[in-house]
Amino acid sequence: MLGRLLDGRYLIGPRIARGGMATVYEATDLRLDRVCALKVMRPGLGDDDDFAGRFVREARSAARLSHPNVVGVFDQGDDDGTLFLAMEYIPGRTLRDVIRSEAPMSPARALALLDPVLSALAAAHNAGIVHRDVKPENVLLSEDGRVKVADFGLARAVSAETQHTAAGGVLIGTVSYLAPELVAHGRADARTDVYAAGVVLYELLTGRKPHQGGSPIEVAYKHVHEDVPAPSTLVPGLPPYVDALVARATARDPDRRPADARVLLHQVRRVRDALDHGVLDDPELTDDLAPTVRVPSAAEDDDAPFDPGFEPSDVPTVLTPEQVAVGGRTDDTSVIGPRPAARGATAVPRPRRPAPRRSRRGPLLLLVVLLLAVAAGVGGWWFGSGRYITTPGVLDLTTSAARAKIQAAGLIFRVGDRAYSENVASGHVISTDPAGGERVTRHGTVTAVVSRGPERHPVPQLAGRTLADAQAALRDAHLSVGDTSYSWSRTVDKGVVVSLSPKPGTELRRNAAVDLVVSKGPKPVKVPEVTGDRESSAAKTLHKLHLKTTVTRRHSDTVDKGDVISQAPDSGRLLPGDTVRLVVSKGPVLVEVPEVRRMKVDEATSTLRSDGFSVHTERLQYYIGLGLVVKQDPSSGERVPRGSTITIYVV
């Protein structure tokens, strides 16, 4: 490929990288005079027309994803079966290079690198795009410190056409970063990218991949059946909440993961904030990040111990009447209520008092203290952990199933917005606020966004409309104009749509591109040379080119009757339907031969020459010298072309 010119525009330079589906080259855009990265697909993938079509549409989707942490897509093309993408060129290195040179790295450094990656993924998830191949090789670090994620949309385009059985299919994605559900069921959504991002974080923290084996199948098996180990098992001293963050992102059950990259990014920034403030252990943050969606039963709640929120020394000391009698001493100031006297203690006589006063004051004080203790305990529990519960994960559940699960947890379920989704079926939950796994007050409200299914709009009928009208119709249909090409047409006026792809009535997602073919009008044709041809032959030649003819006839002494004397125009180009003017010969002008018999030779010669004839004189065999014309050829009265030779015979 080195030195090849693609699409008459991109001059291919040295190879940058090579993968299973494509090779990336440094290239020069000769039209705009700039350096770009050119991803050239393997020939085998570009041979399939359906795949090529999906590749083009997905490339356009990726091009519309504008984000500072996403590698920009400039152009897409097909050069005689060679599919390619022209992308932003990022000189520098990949995150794989950083891992090789720096890992294991500090949590602060690892999260600082992951933050822009998640920002890019969050923008993609918000636009309905799932990357499916998040890995260090697809994260580029420019020389000025920018972090960019590459290959948006490409894995999705390939996977749509290459999901086959294990016997002969292809599994898209690098095996070390594949989520369990993608391995086991071939299903992928935003949480699939979250899992891969969690594996990348583990690798940044430890310098190793979490699951290793002798073959890709063995690694994939471990993803399905084994949890990602805590990074602190390899790097002791990591804060517990960093372990919890990795465990949350790489939970094997998708419902236990953050709903998308936006949620994971929020959690990453909470952890970064804790690290920036030097917090080494934050139980509340660790609990919040713990990957659980299990809701305790009522029995579990009743039996669960709780922290009263105060120390025993905070409880006021209540003395029994016996302790008062001995000077108020006690061996345990935290004891509330009566306790037996010590063996051997001597009772001190005390004055008699009215029974009612003795019987009311002690129990009353005891009751007050007990109430205060219970109130303090309940308050501590309520404002501590008891006030909050974990929001159950209900993503991709039907509305009724999500409602039942939320209400079973003691929360109020409310349906908020309804939104289109490419990944979640109609009537199923796309997201919740608060998200699954986040803390919410008891009896609080969980608001769900419910899917309306994929957003689809039919392609309108555009053939026969002007280009401006077609563009307006596509905007009204929530679609966009794709490639606009032009072709000659004898039947469609210039500037009018000839055809479109996909065909009218096809259901497309919002802002999908529709390609148009617009008429340039009739194609000019080169005027053929028909001078000297027979009239019928010339007309046939011109009519095949859809040119009209007009014929003028005139005499010609040099051109045979029925032949074309001249044409106008006789060169250049005309549009179909234009006229070529032909001049066709009627032959020479005919003149009647005069009678010259019985004339003297000189008189006959003069008469014939005056009428434009040539004269040839011959003597008869029996010439006697009279000089008298006795015969002429042609005979008198015949019509012959002007200038013909008349032979006279004399005696």
Image (cartoon, rainbow, N blue to C red):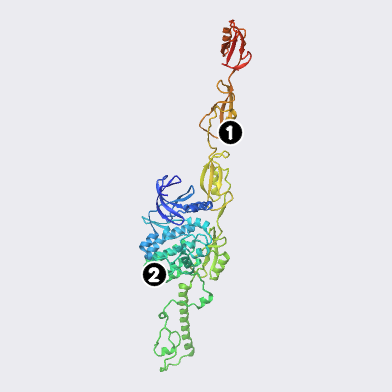
Residue 222 position, x and y percent, is: 47, 68
Quarter of the image with the C terminus is: top right
First in residue order: circle 1 vs circle 2: 2
Q: Is residue 266 visible?
A: no
Viewer-nearest of discs 1 and 2 = 1
Q: Is residue 298 above or below residue 76?
A: below
Q: Is residue 395 above or below residue 308?
A: above
Question: Label 2, on which residue?
Answer: 234
Image quadrant of residue 466? top right
Disc 1 to disc 2: CB gap under 8 Å: no
For the residue carrying disc 1, how many other residues have a C-alpha within 10 Å: few (<14), some (14-19), or many (20+)?
few
In the image, what residue type sits under mark 2? Leu
Q: Which mark is residue 543?
A: 1
In space, the residues marked 1 and 2 are separated at their CA atoms by 85 Å
Give residue 428's mark.
none
Q: Amino acid at mark 1?
A: His
Horizontally, residue 569 falls left or right of residue 286, namely right
Which residue does the image show at 58% across and 35% down from the upper left?
A: 544
Image location of residue 135, percent across then percent down: 43, 60
